[in-house]
Image: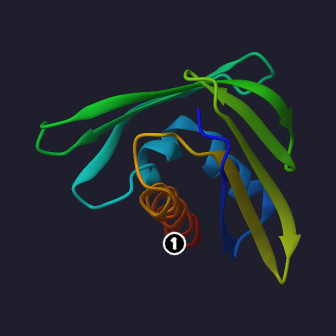
Amino acid sequence: MGNKIITIDAHIINSMEKVWNFYTEPKHIVNWNFASYDWHCPEASNDLREGGTYFARMEAKDGSFGFDFTAIYDVVSLHDKLSYTLEDGRKVITLFSVEDGGIKVTTSFEAEDQNPLDMQKAGWQAILNNFKSYTETN
């Protein structure tokens, strides 16, 4: 397991309630949880409680590749913090804070060993950018 921590963030012009709901509700997750236009998230579920399971199916639209993203929540603090552990033991923390007329969403995650750090950061940032776009336009 890599010990390197990667941090990404986005500033979303919307209310905390809407940002939180769009980030955590499966009916919204499936609309933004992918890094590029040729991927999608056809299925998501979220048991939003400590010990609950987060699940998202991520697939290439052409069906050539896909994977399940599964984690168990360690901390769920409404409108403040989500922390979970991925199946491979890596930790992820997402913070929500009011800032400059909007909401800053900051995610820090432990890098994995199979892909370059810049590729991991770019992929996670692209997903967060999709979230920002979806939340600001819906």
Q: Nearer the viewer, residue 126 or 100?
A: 126
- Neighbor class of circle 1 (other Cα within 10 Å; few <14, some 14-19, many 20+) is few
Q: Quadrant of residue 14?
A: bottom right
Q: Residue at x 43, y 55 (%)?
A: 116
Residue 92 pos. (x, y %)? 69, 40
Q: Residue at x 20, y 36 (%)?
A: 65
Q: Which quarter of the figure is the N terminus placed in? A: top right
Q: Residue at x 66, y 49 (%)?
A: 4
- In this rendering, the answer to whether 5 lies above or below 105 is above
Labels in figure, total = 1
Q: Quadrant of residue 81?
A: top right
Q: Amino acid at mark 1?
A: Thr
Q: Nearer the viewer, residue 65 or 100?
A: 65
Residue 131 pos. (x, y %)? 53, 60
Q: Residue at x 51, y 44 (%)?
A: 29
- In this rendering, the answer to whether 71 lies above or below 51 is below
Residue 79 pos. (x, y %)? 85, 49
* SS at badge 1: helix
Residue at the far top: name it. 51
Residue at the far bottom: name it. 100
42 relative to 123 in the view: left or right: left
Residue 72 pos. (x, y %)? 67, 21
Color theme of the render: rainbow
Q: Quadrant of residue 132?
A: bottom right
**Residue that carries the numbered disc 1 in the rendered image:** 137
